[in-house]
Amino acid sequence: MSSRRDDTLTAEIARLDGLGLGALRDLWRHRLGSPPRFASAELTRLWLAWELQARARGGYDPATRRWLKQLSKSSKADAPPTSAARGGLKPGAVLTREWGGVTHRVKVLEEGFAWAGQNYGSLSEIATRISGTRWSGPRFFGLKQGER
């Protein structure tokens, strides 16, 4: 691969760091088709970077492709996500939590959650942004019992 193509690929991957989940999903749709469901911005960013490199450099060798294909047939990896991925929540439901004197409302979407004008792949990501510390999203929003 030429140095110029390497530089272009490096710049393209570096640009991913500045994109939010919505922009990453738009880029995925434009380049690869339907984006992954329920993936955080960070995971989507990593997958996109891998895909860009794989397309530029050829991806997996044939033996690895065969092994992955065999592995996917023997697992339920290709089964569509169920509502369990959203904790049994149905799209349209609204979760409410007061934190620091502010009431936060999160809407359940077909593919993740919406809060403060942005889409997120997980409740935990939202809970962490609200609180400033790492939280289990379902616990933060009162969907799971446990100590705080």
Image (spheres, rainbow, N blue to C red):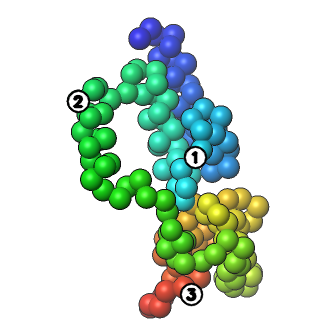
Badge 3 density bin: few <14, some 14–19, many ≥20, Cα 10 Å: few
Residue at the spot 67% in from the left edge and 59% down from the top edge:
119
Badge 2 density bin: few <14, some 14–19, many ≥20, Cα 10 Å: few
Closer to the eye: label 2 or 3 = 2
Q: Position of residue 120 (x, y in %)?
A: 62, 60
Decide if residue 79 is in sight here.
yes
Disc 2 residue type?
Ala
Secondary structure type for disc 1:
loop
Closer to the eye: label 1 or 2 = 2
Q: Quick one: label 2 or label 3, which is nearer the N terminus?
A: 2
Residue at the spot 32% in from the left edge and 48% down from the top edge:
72
Label number found at residue 63: 2
Secondary structure type for disc 2:
helix
Q: Which residue is mark 3?
A: 142
Structural distance between the alpha carbons of marks 2 and 3? 47 Å
Closer to the eye: label 1 or 3 = 1
Residue at the spot 51% in from the left edge and 10% down from the top edge:
4
Q: Quadrant of residue 28?
A: top right
Label number found at residue 77: none
Label number found at residue 35: 1
Secondary structure type for disc 3:
loop
